[in-house]
Image: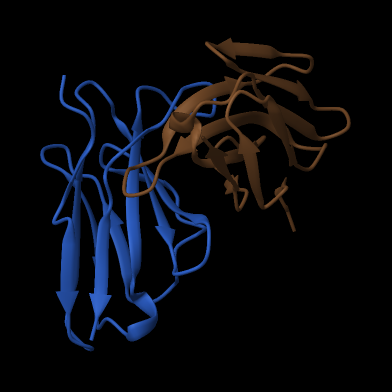
């Protein structure tokens, strides 16, 4: 059973470009969480999605950031018009059911560098 | 504002010694507390999911306790080994069950 997969592992974008980060949850998991780790900071919750639904996006910046988890395919975190401050490690995690009663399984992360 | 604090920030322990560290979280709106182990260049790995006041969980030499009334959890490592070197994170789940707040972690280094 493959773990949570994220790609790309490293992404370099120039200011103003778009970044697309993908997350494939573990088989059988329909709940996906995205987290961001800014340099010298801890993990911060961004968004929680189930298939085709955004459940909680309270941690996501209001502008330029969007997330989706379609019926088929991976979850996508999209950052439009990237700025240097978006440089960070982005992790996704999946769980089999909703809520905090279940372990989250983390992917290896995508390190975004904005030049 | 919900705040989760971990102490100490870093810890150096001699191999073979036992150690413990703390995660403090809001005592209201508690839903669950997770502990993770995060090694450098890897991704966080779940250690424990704790939901009930008084919970005690154990995995090998690592154990954790939970006090939701006073808002703290302890993680214990018995007989530290070099492979225990990692950052240990706790994550507080508020009662909405989708509001997750991570502590900044305790960085543990084991001296051989």
Tell me if I can see residue A79 in this picture: no
Q: Quadrant of residue B91?
A: top right
Name the residue rendered at 51%, 29% in the picture. A99
B24 sits left or right of A3 in the view: right
Q: Position of residue B98 (x, y in %)?
A: 53, 40
Q: Position of residue A10 (x, y in %)?
A: 17, 62
Of the pair B58 and B10, the residue shown nearer to us: B10
Of the pair B97 and A115, the residue shown nearer to us: A115
Name the residue rendered at 35%, 22% in the picture. A96
* Image vertical order of residue B66 relative to residue B59, above or below: below
Q: Quadrant of residue B57?
A: top right
Q: Position of residue B21 (x, y in %)?
A: 71, 36
Name the residue rendered at 47%, 32% in the picture. B82
The quarter of the rendered structure image containing the N terminus of chain B is: bottom right
From this viewpoint, which residue is outermost toward the right? B70
Of the pair B79 and B44, the residue shown nearer to us: B79
Name the residue rendered at 63%, 21% in the picture. B50
What's the colour scheme?
by chain
Q: Position of residue B96 (x, y in %)?
A: 62, 38
Tell me if I can see residue B71 in this picture: yes
B26 sits left or right of B19 in the view: right
Total count of labels: 0
Chain for colour blue: A
Colour applied to chain B: brown
């Amino acid at each position: 059973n493959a773990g949570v997969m994220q790609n790309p592992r490293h992404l370099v974008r120039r200011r103003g470009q778009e970044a697309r980060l993908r997350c494939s949850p573990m088989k059988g998991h329909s709940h996906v969480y995205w987290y961001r780790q800014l340099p010298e900071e801890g993990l911060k919750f961004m968004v929680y999605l189930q298939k085709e639904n955004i459940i909680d996006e309270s941690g996501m910046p209001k502008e330029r950031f969007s997330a989706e988890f379609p019926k088929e395919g991976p979850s996508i975190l999209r950052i439009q018009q990237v700025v240097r401050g978006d440089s960070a490690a982005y992790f996704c995690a999946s769980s089999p059911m909703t809520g905090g009663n279940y372990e989250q399984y983390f992917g290896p992360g995508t390190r975004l560098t904005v030049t | 504002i919900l705040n989760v604090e971990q102490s100490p920030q870093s810890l150096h322990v001699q191999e073979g010694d036992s150690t413990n560290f703390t995660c403090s979280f809001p005592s209201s709106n508690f839903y669950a507390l997770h502990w993770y182990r995060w090694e450098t260049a890897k991704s966080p790995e779940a250690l424990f999911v704790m939901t009930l006041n008084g919970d005690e969980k154990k995995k090998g030499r690592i154990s954790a306790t939970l006090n939701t009334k006073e808002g703290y959890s302890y993680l214990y490592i018995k007989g530290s080994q070099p492979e225990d070197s990692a950052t240990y994170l706790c994550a507080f789940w508020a009662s909405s069950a989708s509001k997750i707040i991570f502590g900044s972690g305790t960085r543990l280094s084991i001296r051989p």
